Image (cartoon, grey):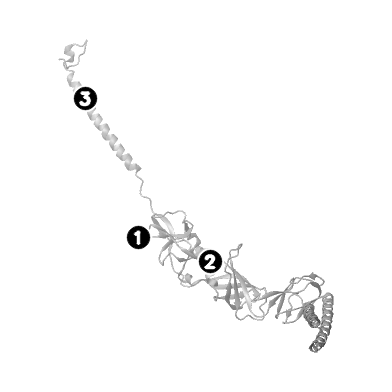
Amino acid sequence: MSGAPRFEGVPHHALAGAEVPVKLFHSSASVVARAACLAILCAALFACKRHEAPAPAPRPVVAVAAQADGHASTSSLPGQIQSRYSTPLSFRINGKILERRVRLGDSVKAGQVVARLDPADVEKNNASARAQLDAAEHQLVYAKQQLDRDRAQAAENLIAPAQLEQTQNAYASALAQRNQAQQQAGLSSDQLRYATLSADHAGVITAEQADTGQNVTAGQAVYTLAWSGDIDVICDVPETALPAFAVGKEANVKLAGLPGKTFKARVRELSPAADAQSRTWRAKLTLEAPAPDVRLGMTADIAFASSDAEKGAFTVPSTALFHDNGHPAVWIVKQPGDALELRRVDVARYGERTVTIARGIAAGDRIVWQGVHTVSAGEKVRVVAPLHPEDFAS
């Protein structure tokens, strides 16, 4: 047969029974191949099942339901007692201080003499001005008499009109010189009076800026006088407390030097601009009924109620605060599903360990207290209570 394989050198009778083993060989190989494929397929399926990661368990987070404070919290700021008005006392002329009659801390009355300059120079100037005034007045009297005579003679045509005009001019000049001398004499009298320094209001001397024997210029402070009357409490207000220091707001003032006493005060003035260095606003509060033992310079503790916006606010630990592109935010555990949501909030006040949130959350919202930097939006979590809630107290 042309299609049968040829085996040279092999007898034909030896090939007569070889056909059956060849067929058996091909059948066995096919079965082995199918079994191998099945084994490989099973192994692949098993490997796929083995690499499928199990679903992660929800992350446990410490979260607590928000509860409104229900009242305005109270804060305090340090301050100092000052007089409402305080002015420097200074001479209005140059000179050498001859005498100082009061000292630091002395009480003075309005019009009381507190210091004097050496009057020698101003007395000489005043005497010279008086002499010039006397001369000018005598000259004016003479000019007036001459004018009266010339007018009488001119009426009888005894003198020429030109002579009368000269007399009139001389009188006008004498009158002007007399007026000038009067002004100069008045100025010299004022300067003589200015050599004595008097208190323009009743008050207390709070500073001394010049000594006896010192040469001072006009306007140079010799004393600082704190006026009697209204007493202020001065404090520097941070930005977060500005709403509580609007003009007309009330506060309670305690003084370290007068323990057990509390004074009512009212804001009368708030600086319109912040200090460039401290970034605080200067506030002045007036004590409504200061006691006689309240002394200038005493340190004060000013207790004030927080703004009305904080009455419905929520206080959370500082560890709960997060930031969303620079804006304050907190993580909220949404219901149902316990997925996280980042929500922006408005902070009313920063405490030492707490934050007061004015807007952005509602009562019952579950707020994450810890681990705010390790979670992400949409993440499934499991809420757990804090082990030691007292650790988060303000």
Q: Who's the residue at 47% across and 71% down the image?
A: 311
Tag 1: amino acid: Pro
Q: Nearer the viewer, residue 241 or 13?
A: 241
Q: Is residue 373 above or below residue 216?
A: above
Q: Nearer the viewer, mark 3 or mark 1?
A: 1
| Residue contact at pointers 1 and 2, CB within 8 angstroms | no
Q: Give the mark nearer the N terminus: 2 vs 3.
A: 3
- Where's residue 264, x and y in %? 58, 78
Mark 1: secondary structure: loop
Mark 3: secondary structure: helix
Q: Who's the residue at 68% across and 75% down the image?
A: 86
Q: Which mark is residue 243?
A: none
| Residue contact at pointers 2 and 3, CB within 8 angstroms | no
Q: Which mark is residue 336?
A: 1
What residue is pinned by disc 2? 240
Q: Who's the residue at 50% across and 61% down the image?
A: 318
What residue is pinned by disc 3? 26
Position of 309 with respect to 168 (left or right) is: left
Q: Quadrant of the N terminus?
A: top left
Q: Nearer the viewer, residue 182 or 1?
A: 182
Tag 2: amino acid: Thr
The 10 Å Cα crowd at callout 2, few under 14, some 14 to 19, many 20 or more, is some
* Rendering quarter of residue 361: bottom left
Q: CA distance from mark 3 to mark 1?
A: 65 Å
